């Protein structure tokens, strides 16, 4: 009898331990890019650390998934990405490898401020004259995010079947014809991208400079989607994203609800302070013209009244031609732009030519934070770095 009683107690204790362990199991979370990973890490701090898929100077537009990445996706409880318009090369992997996970596509969450892709390198790039924070920003708020995405869904832009079709017939065919090797960020692939760096990238650039992929021109560049998906570069959107992530984590892991809520409050407070800091830092450079490599910054520009007047590429998946260099030279002369900014994920070749021929200063801004250590503070460091780079060059 005593033995049975002792066995019963041990069994009960074991069951309680097992239940507690199961209840407090850490959620396995995978995030595609560093700035979003930072926001997720901030909300999860003290519970678990999310995994980051695309790091360093890899280009998110043409990232080649590794076996270890595939395993992370298969084991995940939650996967967070921007959406197929940004992480184009990950569409198939995220669609097919995350059957057991909750997938959050941030481009679809309610409450975001969205801006349309710009159709030409010079159009609507003169600060916030007509499309500033109080114009285009409010227009989207008035018409409603849900209405915009209802339209997208009617057109089939975001459904899974379209994702697969795009991955099989769109992106892959483009890669076969034009080569993902145009992404300087892929140079770090240990298996074969170094060979491309020696032979492919420069030859590809020289071919493009001679023959010009501008034959596709800017209208083709944005055929992949109507909306600019660099949504994290608006601090207001970062707050919306943090709230959405916290709500999803609470649903997934309610045992840690109080931690997620406290972390969210802290993150929102820090984001509000960052917004104030960046407003003050950008006041001296508001309206000062500059050139960028990739037209990726309108969320930052409209938020802080910055005056990007030209871009080498609307879509970095296409390399620029001679005509683009000529256009940018004219833009520099017409606007008096004094700085041009490259990104660490891509070759500075065209901007080097521009600086040589116009005397414009060359800087670097990085919307993904290639050199920023992943973690809860990465988002804040990334935004500060970008603003400091622009400010440092324009005030030099």
Image: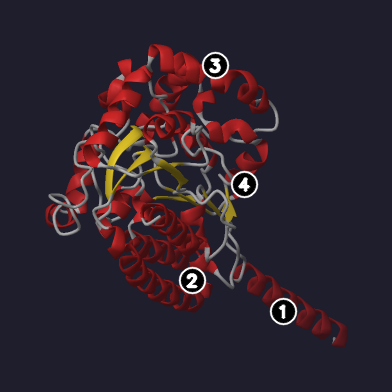
Q: Secondary structure at mark 4?
A: helix
Mark closer to the observer (3, 1): 3
Q: Are marks 2 and 4 in contact (CB under 8 Å)?
A: no
Q: Which is nearer the N-term, disc 1 or disc 2? A: 1
Which class describes the residues within 10 Å of circle 4: few (<14), some (14-19), or many (20+)?
Answer: many
Q: Is residue 380 above or below residue 164?
A: below
Percent of width and height locating residue 247: 40, 66
> Circle 1 sits on which residue?
12
Mark closer to the observer (1, 4): 4
At a point 26% along the width and 30% down the height, the residue shown is: 330
The quarter holding residue 112 reads: bottom left
> Circle 3 sits on which residue?
203
3D distance between C-alphas at marks 3 and 4: 36 Å
Mark closer to the observer (3, 2): 3
Q: Which mark is residue 72?
A: 4
Question: Is 11 placed left or right of 311 in the picture?
Answer: right
Q: Is residue 159 above or below residue 19?
A: above
Q: Is residue 230 above or below residue 154?
A: below
Q: Which mark is residue 144?
A: none
3D distance between C-alphas at marks 2 and 4: 23 Å
At a point 46% along the width and 46% down the height, the residue shown is: 363
Nearer to me, 232 or 330: 330
């Amino acid at each position: 009898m005593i033995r049975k009683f002792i066995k019963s107690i041990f069994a009960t204790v074991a069951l309680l331990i097992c239940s507690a362990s199961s209840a407090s199991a850490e959620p396995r979370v995978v995030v595609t890019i560093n700035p979003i990973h930072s926001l997720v890490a901030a909300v999860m701090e003290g519970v678990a650390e999310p995994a980051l898929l695309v790091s360093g100077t890899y280009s998110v537009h043409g990232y080649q998934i590794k076996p270890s990445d595939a395993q992370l996706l298969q084991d995940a409880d939650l996967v967070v990405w921007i959406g197929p318009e940004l992480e184009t090369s990950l569409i198939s992997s995220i669609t097919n490898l995350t059957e057991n996970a909750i997938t959050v596509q941030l481009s679809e969450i309610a409450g975001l401020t969205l801006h349309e892709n710009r159709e030409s390198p010079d159009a609507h790039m003169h600060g916030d004259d007509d499309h500033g924070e109080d114009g285009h920003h409010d227009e989207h708020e008035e018409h409603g995010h849900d209405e915009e995405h209802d339209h997208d869904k009617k057109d089939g832009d975001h459904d899974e079947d379209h994702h697969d079709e795009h991955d099989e017939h769109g992106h892959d065919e483009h890669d076969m014809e034009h080569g993902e090797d145009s992404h300087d960020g892929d140079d770090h692939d240990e298996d074969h991208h170094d060979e491309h760096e020696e032979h492919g990238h420069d030859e590809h650039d020289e071919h493009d400079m001679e023959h010009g992929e501008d034959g596709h021109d800017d209208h083709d560049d944005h055929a992949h989607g109507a909306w600019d998906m660099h949504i994290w570069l608006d601090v207001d959107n970062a707050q919306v994203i943090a709230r959405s992530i916290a709500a999803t984590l609470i649903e997934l892991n309610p045992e840690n609800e109080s931690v997620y809520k406290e972390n969210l409050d802290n993150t929102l407070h820090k984001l509000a302070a960052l917004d104030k800091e960046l407003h003050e830092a950008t006041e001296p450079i508001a309206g000062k013209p500059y050139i960028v490599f990739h037209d990726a910054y309108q969320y930052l520009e409209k938020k802080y009244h910055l005056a990007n007047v030209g871009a080498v590429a609307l879509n970095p998946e296409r390399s620029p031609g001679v005509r683009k260099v000529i256009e940018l030279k004219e833009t520099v002369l017409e606007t008096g732009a004094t700085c041009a900014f490259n990104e660490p994920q891509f070759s500075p070749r065209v901007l080097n030519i521009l600086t040589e021929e116009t005397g414009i200063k060359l800087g670097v801004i990085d919307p993904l934070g290639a050199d920023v250590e992943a973690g809860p503070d990465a988002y804040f460091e990334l935004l500060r770095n970008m603003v400091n780079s622009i400010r440092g060059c324009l005030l030099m």
